[in-house]
Amino acid sequence: MKTSAADPLAHIPPLSERRLALRVTPDALRALRGGHPWLFDRAIVSQSGDGQPGDLAVIFDDRRRFVAIGLYDPTSPIRVRVLHHGAPEPIDRTWLHSRLSEAAAWRASLPENGTTGYRLVHGENDGLPGLVIDRYDDTLVVKLYSAAWVRWLARVRDVLDEVCPASRVVLRLSRDLLRQPQHLCDLADGTVLAGPRPEGAVLFTENGLRFEADVLRGQKTGFFLDQRDNRARVEKLAAGLRTLNVFAYSGGFSLYAARGGAPEVVSLDASAPALASAERNFALNHHLQPVAAARHTVLAADAFAALADLRGRGRRFDLVIVDPPAFAKQESEVRGAIEAYGRLTGLALGVLAPDGTLVMASCSSRVSAPVFFEAVNRAATETGRPLREIDRTGHPIDHPVRFPEGAYLKCLYATAP
Ligand code: SAH
């Protein structure tokens, strides 16, 4: 993989040799020893000096024994993201190589099954907190959730070239990071770190279906890779069912429903560009007979208003999929999120034909699975259509869960009388 003449990382200051030494509260010590990847600012009792984002910080116990080492980030309340705990270990190129290799090996089965778009590195849950790497065929998208990774980027790119060679590497930055440009060393969201700049969307496959992803500007890194297993499940349910896909984005669930034999599929989303992408994704799969046979339409509207409107107009569907954005990004939003899940359940049931199938998903990590399932069931019962559950699902293999806060995705399958 060649980088262009002007390497966008050439001006990034080198990694510092400095190690910060930290002492922390007994509670934090216990959590770190238990493998938790986060140390919050409020849990730091003493610190050997000031640090820059990306410095390595070593956490010691009262007897000066090594507990953990991680990336220091003075810009975040998650002050240290732990890279390693237990016995001391150098955090060097070899270490990064083995972390990335392990992550790649864990996903080795996916490309064999017609999937070239998947998450290669899932942050904390792959031992690389704050770092997400998604693969879209021969394009890799590196997404940072902490300023601490900026000075590590050149090393990440180098090691990736060995572990998962690709023709292009694109950088994406989280919303929080974009709010702190002073720590980004002039890197912009969508900077191409290696290879040619993509002209338009990149193409990849998921379970044999073709999709495009706008890796430079699309939501997340261009596609919601975490719903692959739920989409495959929807395909199995969809034969003969008039299907409504609410919060459809680029039509992932819609295409699977069509391939599964849904005669009619409506993709509803507030984003017109996302729906245009859904239409292109249908066109990409027109060679598949059931996809060509399905009548696909898009509806650009607010989901809450549109569901009420469809109900009023007497539109009914046999399969309704509801996969909203994360409603609770912080603790203060949890109550509102639970209420919204209830409201959406009622609205979805309003357009669901008798004995139709409802698929309700949530990606809010702050709303736990039991609380979500209870909110959906309660709302359904209140509308007089208590759900008959088929299944509850969680994470796919490329989005492993290795600490409690890592569990965010849950999905309920049910029918309603
Ligand atoms: N189901 C999709 C992912 C959904 S992500 C998939 O499998 O790919 C959430 C989507 O909700 C985004 O596409 C966003 O544009 C859309 N959205 C957010 N708020 C909305 C609203 N109020 N009404 C309709 N769509 C909304």
Image (cartoon, rainbow, N blue to C red):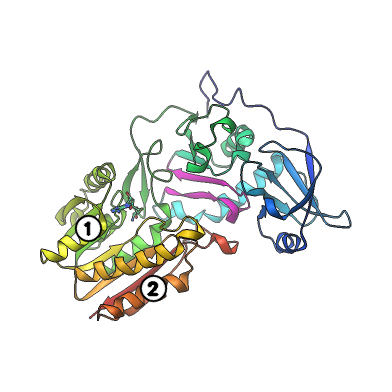
Q: Is residue 315 visible?
A: no
SS label for mark 2: helix
**Quadrant of res 352:** bottom left
Q: Is residue 396 left or right of residue 391?
A: right
Q: Is residue 121 magenta?
A: yes
Q: Is residue 126 left or right of residue 66?
A: left
Q: Position of residue 74 (x, y in %)?
A: 66, 41
SS label for mark 1: helix
Q: Is residue 360 magenta?
A: no
In the picture, the disc for residue 63 is none
Mark 2 is on which residue type? Ala
Q: Position of residue 314 (x, y in %)?
A: 11, 67
In the picture, the disc for residue 375 is 2
Location of the C terminus by quadrant is: bottom left
Up-down: is 129 above or below 384? Answer: above
**Residues packed near mark 2 inside 10 Å, few (<14), some (14 to 19) or many (20 plus):** many
Q: Residue at x 46, y 74 (%)?
A: 370
Mark 1 is on which residue type? Ala
Q: Position of residue 298 (x, y in %)?
A: 19, 51
In the picture, the disc for residue 305 is 1
Point out the stretch of residues depicted in magenta. 116-137
**Quadrant of res 283:** top left
Q: How many marks?
A: 2
Q: Position of residue 190 (x, y in %)?
A: 45, 33
Q: Earlier in the sequence, mark 1 or mark 2?
A: 1
Q: Residue at x 54, y 32 (%)?
A: 181
